[in-house]
Image (cartoon, helix red, strand yellow):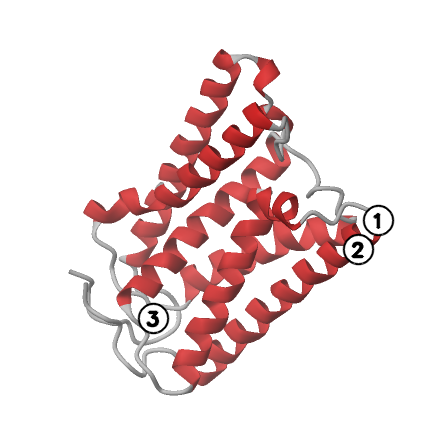
Amino acid sequence: MRDAGRGTTSRSVASVRVVVGSAVLVVLALSYAEQRAAGRGDLVDFLGYFTNLTSLSTGVLLVVTGVLALTGRRVPGWLTVARAVATACLLVVALVSNVLATGAGGAPPWVTAVLHVVFPCLVVLDWLVVADRPSLPWRRLWLVLPYPVLWLGVVLTRGRTDGWVPYGFLLPERGLGSLVLHVTGLLIGLLGAGALVWAVSGTRGLWPRRPPATT
């Protein structure tokens, strides 16, 4: 996998990524602090929500990507692929939060709005507009699946052992058929979102200078 070329990200774009990534990390910290104050301070449960875990991971990716660009260092290709996967996951977060699940673990409405609407929109807009990403090879589309599959495995195991799941549609008592249907739908949705992200990576975007294609 070839690295994205140095100098393909402007300082203004890099700075915005650092600010947005840092801001979502602050939002997550405030949300967790508020839940802890309300007696719901289990960090494992908090990060058990796909929205929270994905937002945390994406925020860190944005900060790291922005800092690398600001310091004139090369952004490795694997980091861009990770950002692509995060973008696909946030697309699913925005969809599922409005169709299958509501809220974010008892978070206040403004936190829910930031994590389910504002942040996903900003991340998707970044991927659409800023052409500092290589064209991703379709043979690597499968990379959108390992992270959510691992999350599902942990969540479903917890559902069977201690009875805790982050979203009602994953409750074991709803039956195996319902569970298989929802999990299959989620994975298909992730592949569909990933396909959109991969397709966009082959476009020029609106911001100048794209790196060489990933091989």
The quarter of the picture where the C terminus appears is: bottom left
The quarter of the picture where the N terminus appears is: bottom left
Question: Dividing the picture into quarters, in which one does residue 129 lie?
Answer: bottom left
Label 3–label 2 contact, CB within 8 A: no
Relative vertical location of residue 53 with respect to residue 133 in this rendering, above or below: above
Residue 192 visible (yes or no) = yes
Q: Which residue is mark 1?
A: 38
Label 1–label 2 contact, CB within 8 A: yes
> Is residue 21 or residue 198 the one in the foreground?
21
**Residue at 30% in and 50% down:** 199
Would residue 209 be found to the left or right of residue 70 on screen?
Answer: left
Which percent across, then down, holds residue 160? 55, 23
Would residue 73 be found to the left or right of residue 160 on screen?
Answer: left
Label 1 and label 2: CA atoms lie apart by 6 Å
Q: Secondary structure at mark 1?
A: loop
Relative vertical location of residue 182 with respect to residue 57 in this rendering, above or below: above
Q: Which residue is mark 3?
A: 132
Question: Which class describes the residues within 10 Å of circle 2: few (<14), some (14-19), or many (20+)?
Answer: some
Disc 1 marks a residue whose amino acid type is Ala
Q: Secondary structure at mark 2?
A: helix
Residue 10 visible (yes or no) = no
Relative vertical location of residue 165 with respect to residue 31 in this rendering, above or below: above
Q: Earlier in the sequence, mark 3 or mark 1?
A: 1
Label 3 and label 2: CA atoms lie apart by 37 Å
Q: Which mark is residue 78?
A: none
Label 3 and label 1: CA atoms lie apart by 43 Å
Q: Which residue is mark 2?
A: 34
Q: Earlier in the sequence, mark 3 or mark 2?
A: 2
Which percent across, then down, holds residue 188? 39, 31
Spot the residue most to the left: 215
Which percent across, then down, holds residue 213? 19, 64
